Amino acid sequence: MAGFIVRKAQRLKTFATMRYFGDGVAGEGIIKDLSLNGSYITGNRPVSIGMVLALHIFVPGEAELLLIDRATVKWVKRADFGVDFDTRELKLAERITQVISKLVKTQHGSSGSK
């Protein structure tokens, strides 16, 4: 099955605004999906494979940004690119998990709870 990539974690389709910084690049974009291990982003400044970025993600409904210090660009296609997160730090992994859980609840709603 050459050419296929097996995903390590489930991805959550979401749309959150964000900023990214690294190696002379400062851009803004939209997170198209998010997982514990990475994200798919559409950005307004070009990046290249292997570039390490810092991400500041504006989580809908939260005052606190999701800050990711090390996101490595794995692929680029025009304005779209994919990054892998360095989630060896437990606090970061916990924060990403918390954000994903909140977004799942928001997206699926709680129509029967009122």
Image: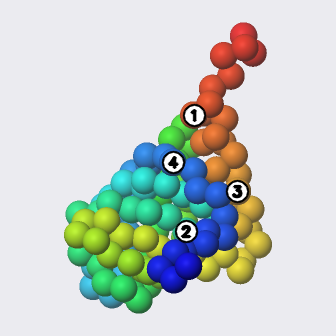
- Out of 104 and 28, give the one closest to the viewer: 104
Residue at image mark 2: 38
Residue at image mark 3: 97
Tell me if residue 6 comes above or below residue 29 in the rendering: below
* Cα distance in 3D space between marks 4 and 1: 9 Å
* Cα distance in 3D space between marks 1 and 3: 15 Å
Q: Which callout, 4 or 3, points to the residue nearer the camera? A: 4
Residue type pointed to by label 4: Lys
* Cα distance in 3D space between marks 2 and 3: 12 Å
Query: Quadrant of the image for the C terminus?
Result: top right
For image coordinates 24% across by 75% down, the residue present is 46
Label whose residue precedes the other's in the sequence (2 or 3): 2
Position in image of residue 65 (x %, y %)? 53, 55
Residue found farthest to the top? 114
Residue type pointed to by label 1: Gln
Label whose residue precedes the other's in the sequence (4 or 1): 4
SS for tag 2? Answer: strand
Position in image of residue 101 (x %, y %)? 69, 46
Say if residue 84 shows up in the picture.
no
Residue at image mark 1: 107
Residue at image mark 4: 13
Left or right of 38 in this view: 97:
right
Mark 2 and mark 3 in contact? Answer it, CB < 8 Å. Answer: no
Say if residue 6 shows up in the picture.
yes
SS for tag 1? Answer: helix
- How many C-alpha atoms fall within 10 Å of the one at disc 1: few (<14), some, or many (≥20)? few
* Cα distance in 3D space between marks 2 and 4: 12 Å
